[in-house]
Image: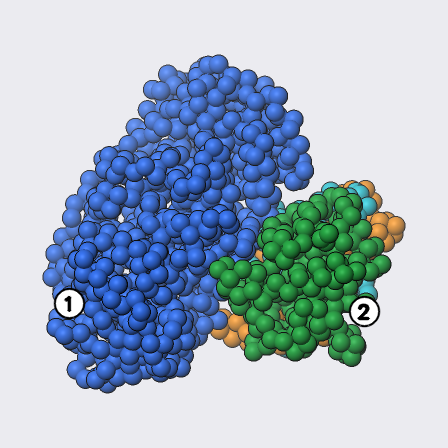
Chain colours: A blue, B green, C orange, D cyan
Amino acid sequence: MSKTPLDTVEHAAATPDVELPWAELGLKKDEYERVVEILGRRPTGAELAMYSVMWSEHCSYKSSKVHLRQFGEKAPQSDALLVGIGENAGVVDVGQGYAVTFKVESHNHPSYVEPYQGAATGVGGIVRDIIAMGARPVAVVDPLRFGAADHPDTKRVLPGVVAGIGGYGNCLGLPNIGGEVVFDACYQGNPLVNAGAIGVMRHEDIHLAKASGAGNKVILYGARTGGDGIGGASILASETFDDAKPSKRPAVQVGDPFQEKLLIECTLEAFAEKLVVGIQDLGAAGLSCATSELASNGSGGMRVTLDDVPLRDSTLSPEEILMSESQERMCAVVEPDKVDRFLAICEKWDVIATVIGEVTDGDRLEIFWHGGKIVDVDPRTVAHDGPVYERPYARPDWQDALQADDANKLPRPGTSEELREQVLKLVSSPNQASKSWITSQYDHFVQGNTVLAQPEDSGMIRVDEESGLGVAIATDGNGRYAKLDPYTGAQLALAEAYRNVATTGAKPLAVSDCLNFGSPEDPAVMWQFAEAVRGLADACQQLGTPVTGGNVSLYNQTGEAAIHPTPVVAVLGVIDDVARRTPVAFQEEGQLLYLLGDTREEFGGSAWSQVIHDHLGGLPPQVDLERERLLGEILISASRDGMIDSAHDLSDGGLIQAVVESALLGGKGARLVVPDGLDAFTFLLSESAGRAIVAVPRSEEVRFNDMCGARGLPATRIGVVDGDAVEVQGEFALSLDELRTAHEGTIPALLA
Amino acid sequence: MTARIGVVTFPGSLDDRDTQRAIRLAGAEPVALWHKDKDLKQVDAVVLPGGFSYGDYLRAGAISRFSPVMETVIEQAKSGMPVLGICNGFQILTEAHLLPGGMLGNDHLHFICRDQKLRVENADTAWTADYEAGQEIHIPLKNMDGRYVADTYTLDRLEAEGRVVFRYLDVNPNGSLRDIAGITNEAGNVVGLMPHPEHATEPLIGTGRTDGLPFFTSILKKLVNA
Amino acid sequence: MARVVVDVMLKPEILDPQGQAVQRALPRLGFEGIADVRQGKRFELEVDGPVDDAALARIRELAESFLANTVIEDFTVKVEEEKVEAGK
Amino acid sequence: MARVVVDVMLKPEILDPQGQAVQRALPRLGFEGIADVRQGKRFELEVDGPVDDAALARIRELAESFLANTVIEDFTVKVEEEKVEAGK
Ligand SMILES: Nc1ncnc2c1ncn2[C@@H]1O[C@H](COP(=O)(O)OP(=O)(O)O)[C@@H](O)[C@H]1O
Ligand SMILES: [Mg+2]
């Protein structure tokens, strides 16, 4: 092998003129110059590797940071927030001494290249964020977006993604309790695979990613480090350092959920014995990220001997070891006298664990290889002082025309017969059809605490067996709405997730998000992003639900064509006693159906406009956050006081979609009457926000009406649970059998 | 005096904690057993819980079957100790040849999670005495490798000897031969099934049914009355 | 170091849905003329030391007791010698 | 009718959790001297008609586009001729 001398710090200082392939590593010229300026010399290859991955868009949020600040600046005062933005995941107080951590992340690109492994490792990554906070993971959710349902490539991507999410999550023993599946041609080359996880811990068990206490040991544990997921490092390694290297390392990793399950158990055991001072998972940017973040968040410096990292492939260069994204690894900081016990726990679980360094007095991160010092940096400059861009943004010139193309003016069904046909077509369209072919591939039952899972409005997990304390989570996003108006679209995503949580009887507490957009270098996309963030931050402030963390995924773009701006919002809620939860399914014949909220003519971005007219134009539904809050309070009170037996929020597909779902789930039909002042079409298909339907036992009707009246929430009696058909008086009837065939047959026919 | 029922944790076991809870709900005392220990801590019966032990790599149950704890479980099972294998536990029991036949990937190639209807065919085993023969129950099912196969001779023999304990009703969720969901050994002390009775023990949780509780009350009564 | 390959296939009388799924997809991909597809597992074992009869016998035992479940599967053991035509 | 075998293995640099699980279990089963185990897939295709170069080329294309994902896997295609040593 041709050996150039090891590129140590000393060597770098002595050879200032050596050209490094910074451009191939994705750095801009001024970014590279910044590195040189910070170091006062050229970086070593290893340092360049670290800066380049940590300053990438993915790790540094360089395009999005200036906007994301609003989540902090506008954060509402919330007593519930224990740990906010900036840590691996936010932590929320849910009472009785329990804290909950949750977060959503994206794994979009890898899932397109290798659907199974891309999606699987997405679940693996988000779960490690949860463990790193000190929590036991208790559930996962998976908001997904695919290309057109009948496109041949969707048949490759979707089953692989679903099998991967299931394969990993099921094997970890995490119930999958919610998510979304949306089809739209805009996601054809850029499917969105977002994954969220929730964890539960006691307040005193919260852990943070920081290395403090000189002399404390840095322990790397979990899988061996291999040559996977190394983007630029191999360029560095092959072009500059060692030409004999294989020049292309795969950018997709294979996950090992079994290893991760062991990682969960041994980490929790180490937490329980109070052996851990600081902890960090290894995700994007691998050891570069873990070491620089741990060191920069702590009080001291850190010294690492890279030779001690257990390898799967002995030919890896130090740059590759630093950049490898091998899955299922964690890094812990442990006091010297507790190291033996920590290692023993790892051994009990057959997890490889190695001391690779220690916390030092200084403030430098120093990394050694074969006796030479190859990294000597201020870790803050790597982890936190990345470039920040004020990318230009501008409202695209097509936005006005798009909004002017009013969906309310589209031709409407002329006869009852036509209305009936359109309703049937709607409930069987891929986006509105039952997703049970997908969700039945996920374990909902494992851990024995699942109170609600999909297709309920929110997933709900029991936290305490004695008291019945529980948490709920829902994720929502509507790229069509956001395309029409990103500010409102982001608010609608929050409003819907908030409503979904409240509909099950839980009180919304906090928010996480995953912001999926096209290229930030396109001013139109950047405008969409800026508007969406502003909208979400404003809405969170008004609803009193702080953003606790999240993820940004940019460059979801094929050529010039960006995806619809797709902010996905997760809302976490708490319920004092899960026995009071409200399900979607109709429970008893004779119960009265009430529509809560106001219905306007709002068809912009609607499912109806898409399914019947293949149209996207006009304005999305209006947002009224005070109304959402009031609706939420009514739903929560009604559930707590036993006034309603089922409830379902209204969103895409409008009222009829909700009624059909409640009817099919409960196996009981409904007779509906079009209320005064509304035409049947608007009543059934408009997508006005801030609405829900509830089923009220007759004995509770007066009390329920009084409550709504006193609090000023419009509540309209629209029918009764009855029979084995959904009947709209004076219009049409659809038997449950016909509805079931239509609603449940679509997805299997397309994908099975 | 109550009965002590062991629940083995293998690396990758997932339902060990809920199985312990189900045992507790039935009134017995759950005892955690570890795959590396041969010692069964004087339990009266053992449950091998569901999960993906060793990731189900190689074949479901194939690696766990060689754990130290299984040496003792096999020995004790042969001398009559009640053993229940749920899902992955059932797979381990077939790999260990305590139960005949084998488990393969579902015929539709997907993981399947559903509320499954079953008929109790044999209410005389150590684990099913609190059911009635012919009773129809709903128990959650969730697996990737749930397709029970055996040669015709073995299947005929199982049928003839009444050793098919549960059969799938309405839907055969995985292509199991003769709709077999669970079987027992000749002595009736070892039972394996794919569905998860431990997930059907509390009214609020999961599917909201409690059709799985009789497993745990059956064994409790048998042990306490013994 | 020598490589021993153990191939494990389902017994012929046992349904192989994975192989069938591949076969069913063939026409869609424009493939005709493949009468049957079966899918099994291939294990590549890198053996320290010589692969003599004794070593092979032990590997055969390993295959029989562990790598295959002979209730449902057949296996073959072979020492890998020839270079086969490689894809990319 | 001829048999063509397509072997699909994870690329060497990609983690193979299945192979690792097998290898880690070996010492417990009393097996020493196996330095590495990798697990892959074996497809047996029964081909109607002669397996000429054209047929092989098409099968290779099938392997590349469908049986393997070449982002993470390598494959080999070979016509099966010799009778190999069989287990039971
Ligand atoms: N869209 C967002 N909204 C709020 N916080 C965000 C968002 N995107 C990222 N963050 C926060 O920025 C921090 C860094 O994000 P990330 O790199 O994804 O975390 P990690 O390193 O744990 O994967 C995290 O605290 C994350 O929650
Ligand atoms: Mg993290």
Q: Is residue A545 above or below residue A72?
A: below
Q: Residue at the spot x=39%, y=24% of the render?
A: A380
Q: Residue at the spot x=56%, y=44% of the render?
A: A260
Q: Residue at the spot x=80%, y=43% of the render?
A: D32
Q: Determine if the C-beta at disc 1 is less than 8 A from ligand 1.
A: no
Which one is in front, C50 or A208? A208
The chain letter for the residue carrying disc 2 is: B
Q: Position of residue B97 (x, y in %)?
A: 78, 62
Residue type at the position of mark 2: Glu
Q: Residue at the spot x=39%, y=58% of the render?
A: A581
Image quadrant of ligand 1? Answer: top left
Q: CA distance from mark 2 to mark 1?
A: 69 Å
Disc 1 target residue: A601
The chain letter for the residue carrying disc 1 is: A
Label 1: element kind: loop
* Callout in the foreground (2, 1): 2
Q: Which quadrant: the N terminus of chain C?
A: top right
Residue D55 occupies which quadrant of the picture?
bottom right
